[in-house]
Amino acid sequence: MTEVVEKKIHSHVLVGFNTDSKGDFWRPSETNQVERYENEVPLQDVLEKLFDWQAVRCPVEVILGDGRRLPYSDRHAIVHSKSEHIFKIATESYVIHQYHEWLIDNIAKILDSELRVGIAGVLRGGGGAFVTVETPEHVVSRHGVSVKSKLLAASSHDSKLATSYKMVGTILMCDNMLVANLWRQKAPWNNRHTLHSLPRLELVRESLGIRLAENATAMCDFVDSLAEITVSDEQWQQIVEELVPIPAEQREQAKSRLENKRSTLHDMWNQDPRCAPWKGSGFGAFQVFNTHQLHTAGSDLTRIDRNMRNLLSTESQRSDELVIATIKSVTGTTTSN
């Protein structure tokens, strides 16, 4: 068995460009192993530390009461080649997307340039994996928010996620990742596990709209548009009450949890260095809720996996859009962003 399995590591993440962030959610725990790099993550480390195994197809049998074994002919187990962990029972049509091929080799083809890995990780003991590709440089918005554009690639062997590539942006002071759909209308590209290879690369590039520099500029405009919304203390109170409602008939235990959440949000608005510098603005309000969701809410034991799954699905986007809509509604803002 590998060291990762013996320690029952749920997630193993390599975090590059570590000097960018003032505080992130890539925190080690008893189930999360995190390694950090001052610059980009060496590609060799990704291949040797994360993707040094394959998912393999194994036959499935049914053992009868008398000990006889019957083959289950139209099903196969998808298994970790080293730990022998079973990810899923799949049909004949299921195609394995090996991580080194779909998250490294194919990204190099799509970008048609040298890979510079920002963050890479395996989740759920290898059931899922992701890689971000980015430039070393970041961009600073007019209101002093440092951001970086990334291409995020992810896949799974446990069917928690289709193989997908999408553009994202990062707010560097907290490493909060936001989907680019918040400021641009390009859909992620998905490939279910029934296809053996990528279609024509130009179609994938067009679907994603891969322009790291342009995406960073658009993200700056998005951040600045929020920073230019004035939020008074009374409006902030209303935003919190609308996004964290406490129904009168709520049970005392649940009411106490919601009151504690409100108190935490107020503290972040006033004191958290990731949010307080923009207190009084729409960006400050957005940053409080986004940072709370990524860094504070829920258990640290599953935080990395949960955050990445929310980002790769539509969960994070829906949550962020609700916060933005509430900020604009309360402040009477009618801008297009």
Image: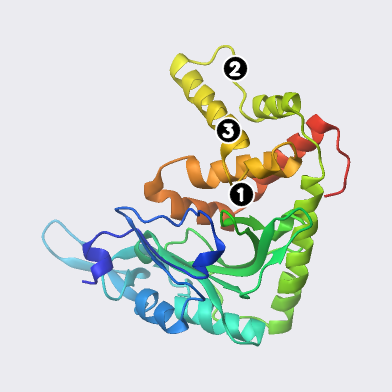
Under tag 3, what secondary structure?
helix
Q: What residue sits 44% from the left and 50% below the top?
A: 303
Q: Is residue 94 left or right of residue 317?
A: left
In front: 245, or 260?
A: 260
Q: Is residue 233 above or below residue 39?
A: above
Q: Where residue 94 sits: x, y (%)?
A: 47, 71
Q: What residue sits 12% from the left and 62% below the top?
A: 67
Q: What residue sits 80% from the left and 57% below the top?
A: 221
Q: Is residue 126 above or below residue 101?
A: above
- Give the number of the disc on residue 265: 3
Color scheme of the displayed model: rainbow
Q: Is residue 251 above or below residue 257?
A: above
Look at label 2 and name its amino acid: Pro
Look at label 3 and name its amino acid: Leu
- Give the number of the disc on residue 247: 2
Q: Residues within 10 Å of mark 1 (few under 14, many from 20)?
A: many
Q: Residues within 10 Å of mark 2 (few under 14, many from 20)?
A: few
